[in-house]
């Protein structure tokens, strides 16, 4: 699936003037820190007026500020192409996988604090197993291996950088 990120983004980003990467998550929780980690890597490697990275270890994007940030993006950029990046919980078989969808993303579903975020592509790194209760899902996010988050963050960031030919 990792090669899919590069392929999908190359096909869709080439003719877009404004590319916005929303790196969603919290640097305070290991399992939720994938988005901010990707944001840090991208910000360190991209210096372009047509590519904007929002979300990193200092500015976390979450349910409290996502509405404000998406309004800011749509007002600041003309016809932005929005790529959403976040961690996810899923079945054990998907642990460590990257899921790419060509549509919006629902954030906070596993902890029963859902928000729909509009975007053109969503990229999710599966960091832990999803359970049937909010408390168990919170525990799984907090107990996620830092190594799996770092590995997925790096894989996602490298594929994005390759698609942008940075």
Image (spheres, helix red, strand yellow):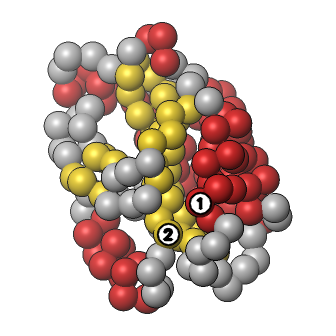
User: Could you tell whether 38 is left or right of 125 in the image?
Assistant: right
Q: Is residue 95 above or below residue 47?
A: above
Give coordinates of residue 102: x percent, y percent. Answer: 44, 48
Q: In the rendered view of the protein, which quadrant contains the N terminus?
A: top right
Residue lying at 64% horizontally and 38% vertically, measured from the top left:
4
Residue at the limit of the structure toward the top, as seen here: 93
The spot of residue 81 in percent (x, y) is 50, 69
Residue 28 visible: no
Q: Is residue 63 left or right of residue 156?
A: left
Q: Which residue is mark 1?
A: 12
Kindly tell me whether residue 5 is visible in this rendering: yes
- Is residue 116 or residue 149 the one in the foreground? 116
**Number of the front mark, 2 or 1:** 1
Q: Are marks 2 and 1 in contact (CB under 8 Å)?
A: yes
Secondary structure of residue under mark 2: strand
Give whichever of 62, 71 is nearer the camera. Answer: 71
Quadrant of res 73: bottom left
Q: Position of residue 108 (x, y in %)?
A: 27, 43
Please, is residue 112 above or below residue 75 in the view?
Answer: above
Q: Residue at x 74, y 62 (%)?
A: 164
Q: Would you place residue 136 above or below residue 156 in this image?
A: above
| Mark 2 or 1, nearer chain start | 1
Percent coordinates x, y for residue 113 in the rendering: 18, 44
Q: CA distance from mark 2 to mark 1?
A: 9 Å
Residue 60 placement: quadrant? bottom left
Q: Which residue is mark 2?
A: 81
- Crowding at mark 2 (Cα within 10 Å: few <14, some 14-19, many 20+): many
Quarter where residue 161 is shown? bottom right
Q: Give the residue at x 56% y 32%.
A: 98
Which residue is pictured at 34% across the width and 72% down the height?
A: 70
* Number of other residues with Cα within 10 Å of mark 1, as a class: few under 14, some 14 to 19, many 20 or more: few
């Amino acid at each position: 699936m990792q090669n899919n990120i590069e392929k999908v983004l190359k096909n869709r980003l080439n003719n877009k003037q404004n590319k916005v990467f929303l790196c969603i998550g919290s640097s305070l929780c290991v399992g939720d820190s994938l988005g901010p980690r990707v944001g840090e890597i991208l910000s360190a490697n991209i210096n372009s007026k047509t590519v904007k990275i929002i979300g990193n270890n200092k500015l976390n994007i979450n349910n409290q500020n996502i509405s404000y940030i998406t309004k800011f993006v749509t007002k600041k950029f003309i016809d932005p192409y929005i790529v959403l990046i976040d961690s996810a919980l899923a079945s054990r078989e998907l642990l460590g996988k990257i899921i790419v969808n060509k549509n919006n993303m629902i954030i906070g579903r596993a902890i029963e604090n859902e928000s729909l975020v509009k975007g053109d592509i969503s990229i999710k790194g599966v960091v832990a197993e999803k359970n049937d209760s909010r408390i168990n899902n919170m525990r799984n996010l907090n107990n996620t291996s830092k190594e799996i988050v770092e590995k997925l963050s790096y894989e996602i960031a490298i594929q994005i950088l390759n698609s942008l030919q940075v």
